[in-house]
Amino acid sequence: MTLALAMLSVAAAPAPDARRLVRQLNAALLARASASAVLQHWCAQRRLANPPVIVARRVAGADKPADMRVRRLLHAAPGEPIGYRRVALACGRHVLSVADNWYRPDELTPAMNAELAATDHPFGIVVQSLRFHRVRLAARVLNGPHRDGVIRQRAVLETPGGTPFSYVVETYTAAVLDEGP
């Protein structure tokens, strides 16, 4: 991931094809509740790995306690525990996004919490049985590939009944432009 970030910092403005691809990915992300599912499809379509599987590689040493803004977005009660994961979502050797995810463990099943703690499975895949939807707070195509990525989105995930259970900040890297053999 460090090499990818270094490469991003010296990259020039994207070519027209790259801009089109970024807009396509952003539109797909805006149209679906699960970014993990979108990335899985993107990985397969771009032939980035065989099999095209998205894994959530934990970023070591990352811990960001939920501040008052995050707690308010999640409608967390005073003293309610808030979980946190920072992961790099990768397909093969391609790190497609880096995500910060604060979530309410009490709104997930014990099996979901155990899976999040013990595996490299993406959050959206683990909680898919909740049939959640996204409330988008921000979605921005960044001005060309650079160290901050090409797309940044912020969203709250809610159950069908409107209970917020996760707040995510996702930054999609220039690796989304890669293509397999």
Image: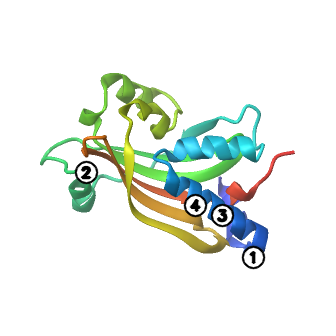
Mark 4 vs mark 1, CA separation in Å: 20 Å
How far across and down, in percent of the image, does residue 53 sit? 65, 35
At numbered mark 3, what does the secondary structure look like: helix, strand or loop? helix
**Residue under circle 1?**
12
Sequence-earlier tag: 4 or 2: 4
For the C terminus, the quadrant is top right
Crowding near the residue tagged with mark 3, few <14, some 14–19, many ≥20 C-alpha atoms within 10 Å: many
Contact (Cβ within 8 Å) of mark 4 with mark 2: no
Residue 15 seen anywhere in this rendered image of the structure: no
Mark 3 vs mark 2, CA separation in Å: 29 Å
At numbered mark 4, what does the secondary structure look like: helix, strand or loop? helix
**What number is the disc on residue 74?**
2
Q: Quadrant of residue 158?
A: top left
Rendered residue at 49%/44% (across/down): 34
Q: Left or right: where does residue 96 sit relative to residue 159?
A: right
Sequence-earlier tag: 1 or 2: 1
Sequence-earlier tag: 3 or 1: 1
At numbered mark 1, what does the secondary structure look like: helix, strand or loop? loop
How far across and down, in percent of the image, does residue 174 sit? 68, 61
Crowding near the residue tagged with mark 2, few <14, some 14–19, many ≥20 C-alpha atoms within 10 Å: many
**Residue under circle 3?**
22
Question: Seen from this angle, which residue lies furthest top?
Answer: 111
Sequence-earlier tag: 3 or 2: 3
| Residue type marked 3 | Val
How far across and down, in percent of the image, does residue 169 sit? 44, 57
Contact (Cβ within 8 Å) of mark 3 with mark 2: no
| Residue type marked 4 | Asn
Crowding near the residue tagged with mark 1, few <14, some 14–19, many ≥20 C-alpha atoms within 10 Å: few
Mark 3 vs mark 4, CA separation in Å: 6 Å
Rendered residue at 73%/58% (across/down): 177
Q: Please name whichever residue, 21 or 167, is drawn nearer the observer in this view of the structure.
A: 21
